[in-house]
């Protein structure tokens, strides 16, 4: 059974370690915050200038001066800090953020990512995505394995304009967890009930399948 | 020397056609609402606006777009704006998209007297086209130049009559960076106080960077994505 | 994850021979007194110390010099220290003199993930020897590299257990820059508080940059040049 | 009559304009603060991280955490701000400081300055001097016209190791005010009672004397 978006987020949350500083992109990545394991303390960074992002405010407590990079009203947690955009991307570039989770349109077997532009469509801009992918030491992509046309999003090479090159470390889709290795995508886990064959069939890039592939644990 | 201006109209009075402006804010958060309104009223055209976003159709820089005052936007993200899209597709408007961290750091570079900086953002992408790149410690970086803006227009929370500024929460964003970067920096503030009322240790932008300051009025502070938790935890 | 250390001894326990250290402070103002005392006690040798100054004979980094723990000083100004002079002239100590702004900016560059920066300081002087230079807008700049330090040791006024730091007055100086630049950053503070006690808007160094923190004891805060006005104006 | 150090400072203070941000070096330059003209508001920068430096504290009010770049205990004035050393030199490099006043051992007719190192003597370091001279748009040197051996400090070329090149705009000594032009030192004013001949005699670099040279006014 393919994972729901919530389950993808839940699986990614297992990658969190105590003390991690984490940047979560818009979409599925944002949901990861709901599944932080018990007993683990994680600090969320929002690249518009905040460490220690908390949940959405209760109704009536929204503050226009306190938003996240998705422009949503949020709160701060005890121990939070505010800074300008240069310091925010400074700490990202300096590798101080332990984990970055992003959505993607395509990922290549070299770890290239495309997630900002579709030729022929209105281009809205890359926002902070290019800085994040070029700088972060540990990037996990959260995305569907195939696009709406059923075509694989895990490719030998990206067809869309790139956001960054050789930067993605891991991918979690609704059917698989994969690692980017020097030799291509390496299948680490499969969703409960999903066969290796299905994953092979939906992966256009080079896929390494070694030994028994375990089912994801939650 | 008096830095205090009566209002936004007075502060932007010499911003004329063709000026290069920096405008602080992230989305609609921390934008110089009063100055934008004054610019719409005064009506300079052919402006280049360096700002992370382009506002929405009926607010922020979107208001200047509606008046066709903007020749070029330099931004990292320009969604949420139908008029922007129309002008862009019709060729009326030029847009230069820049990674957000690069945008921020190019402002800081100007304020710090650094002519250029190195960043890995955009390496291997179309952003790198035509740009010089260089490898340090086995990692490739692009050379990106400091911005050169005629005016920086920022919004702060508190300011004093010497031009010292303090920002509030994530309304800080690009504001202190742009404040450092303008040849002339205009700051509008929620609250203008006398020198000595702000703790020197809490100043985000020292007054040396700020040339004009005024207390703004009628801030709308519009929220783009009102997200709430139904019940308190 | 616990960042709180019991004291300076615990915080510097893994600083061993040959380490590259950054030490905050300007003169004796804002120096990490407790950590320096602990380093003198523990006794690692062959240290490289990046610090604006080298203390005085019987205080600050001077104490480490007396124990012959320092192989190399990287500083902008090293006067006021006879033992320093003796070791330098006898060849026991190596010194690299760097313009103060370059020193500061090379720290910042490390904390901001910028591999190198351009500065005009030192152009045409012996500081420029062997360095790459480049002209931007008709002005010549030197290419200077980000520092690479094993440990940064800083002194703050207040800190919380998440590592957020606030500095007081001109004891800020190099401290927040070095705090950003260490592979491991150790902060000693006058007062250690719980998360939530510091206003997020007033944090100078976000906790992400700080790995170890402890509340210091018995600060001497020695004054180098006690200058006073005889009568109040 | 040659000026006293205080008078040199007093003459330099006449260059101040309302609203100026000023960095004063150690020695004679520091004295300039005592002669700021009435009705003019000047903000003093100390490069260790302060704008709005005030006078020395009254006895008993010294604070070890509040010093200037000369490591002297000082006070802050209303409207002051504190910042780190990178921002401090950032604003200097960006040309935000309107006037810098420095001492010097030698100045050349090209505007080069030497003020940090004497070969054979213990080198203490350049501190912030190289940053200041390379960055400031308006630098006045305050110094004696000759050294203790009676040799001119205004030279065709500096003999001591340089602090910066082509950066000095004006020099005020105990006998003259001079401007650096493309053609060398240009004599602007002479100290009361000091002859042009004396200044010519004590200036080793190329000296331009055009027309009547007025006496300094205080």
Image (tube, coloured by chain):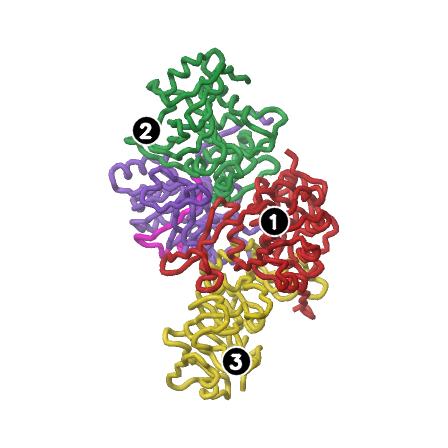
Chain colours: A yellow, B red, C purple, D green
Q: Nearer the viewer, residue C151 or B56?
A: B56
Residue drawn at 45 percent across, 59 percent down: B120
Local secondary structure at mark 1: strand
Determine which quarter of the picture holds residue C67. top left
Q: Main secondary structure of the magenta part?
A: loop
In the rendered image, the quadrant that contains the N terminus of chain A is: bottom right
Q: CA distance from mark 1 to mark 2?
A: 47 Å
The image position of residue B202, as x and y in percent, is: 58, 46
Same chain for mark 3 and mark 1? The answer is no
The image position of residue A130, as x and y in percent, is: 50, 63
- Name the residue beneath numbered marker 3: A146
Residue D56 marker: none
Q: CA distance from mark 3 to mark 1?
A: 43 Å
Q: Nearer the viewer, residue B145 or D41?
A: B145
Specify start and end residues of the magenta stretch as a single range: C9-26
Say whether marks 1 and 2 touch (CB < 8 Å). Answer: no
- Name the residue beneath numbered marker 1: B21
Front tag of 3 and 1: 1
**Can the viewer see residue C59?**
no
Mark 1 is surrounded, within 10 Å at the Cα level, by few (under 14), some (14 to 19) or many (20 or more) other residues, namely many
The answer to whether residue B8 is magenta is no
Dot 2 falls on which chain? D
Dot 1 falls on which chain? B
- Name the residue beneath numbered marker 2: D159
Relative height, residue C177 to residue D206 (above, below): below
Residue drawn at 32 percent across, 42 percent down: C129
Determine which quarter of the picture holds residue A170. bottom left
Front tag of 1 and 2: 1
**Can the viewer see residue D87?**
yes
Dot 3 falls on which chain? A
């Amino acid at each position: 059974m393919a994972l729901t978006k919530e389950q993808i987020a839940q699986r990614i949350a297992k990658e969190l370690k105590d003390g991690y500083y984490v940047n979560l992109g818009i979409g599925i990545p944002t949901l990861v915050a709901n599944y932080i394991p018990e007993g683990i303390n994680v600090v969320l960074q929002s690249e518009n200038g905040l460490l220690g992002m908390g949940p959405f405010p209760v109704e009536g407590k929204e503050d226009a001066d306190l938003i996240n990079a998705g422009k949503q009203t949020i709160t701060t947690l005890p121990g939070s800090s505010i800074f300008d955009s240069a310091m925010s991307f400074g700490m990202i570039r300096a590798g101080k953020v332990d984990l970055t989770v992003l959505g993607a349109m395509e990922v290549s077997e070299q770890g290239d990512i495309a997630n900002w532009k579709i030729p022929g469509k209105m281009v809205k801009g890359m926002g902070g995505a290019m800085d994040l992918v070029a700088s972060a030491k540990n990037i996990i992509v959260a995305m569907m394995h195939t696009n709406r046309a059923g075509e694989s999003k895990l490719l030998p090479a990206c067809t869309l304009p790139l956001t960054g090159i050789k930067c993605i470390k891991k991918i979690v889709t609704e059917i698989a967890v994969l690692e980017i290795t020097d030799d291509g995508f390496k299948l680490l886990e499969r969703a409960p009930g999903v066969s290796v064959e299905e994953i092979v069939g939906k992966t256009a890039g080079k896929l390494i399948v070694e030994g028994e592939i375990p089912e994801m644990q939650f | 020397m008096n830095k205090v201006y009566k209002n936004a109209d007075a502060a932007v009075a010499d911003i004329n056609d063709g000026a290069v402006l920096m405008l602080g804010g992230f989305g609609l958060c921390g934008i110089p609402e009063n100055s934008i309104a004054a610019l719409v009223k005064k009506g300079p055209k052919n402006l280049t606006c360096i700002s992370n976003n382009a506002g929405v159709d009926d607010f922020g820089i979107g208001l200047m777009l509606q008046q066709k005052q903007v020749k070029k936007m330099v931004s990292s993200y320009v969604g949420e704006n139908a008029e922007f899209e129309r002008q862009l597709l019709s060729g009326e408007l030029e847009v230069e998209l820049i990674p957000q961290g690069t945008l921020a750091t190019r402002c800081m570079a100007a304020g710090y007297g650094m002519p250029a900086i190195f960043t890995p953002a955009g390496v291997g992408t179309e952003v790198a086209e035509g740009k010089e790149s260089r490898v340090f410690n086995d990692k490739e970086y692009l050379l990106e130049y400091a911005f050169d803006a005629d005016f920086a227009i920022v919004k702060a929370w508190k300011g004093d009559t010497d031009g010292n500024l303090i920002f509030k929460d994530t309304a800080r964003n690009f504001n202190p960076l742009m404040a450092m970067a303008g040849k002339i920096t205009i700051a509008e503030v929620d609250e203008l106080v006398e020198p000595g009322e702000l703790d020197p240790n809490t100043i985000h932008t020292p007054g040396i960077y700020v040339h004009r300051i005024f207390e703004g009025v009628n801030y709308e502070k519009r929220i783009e994505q009102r997200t709430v938790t139904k019940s308190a935890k």
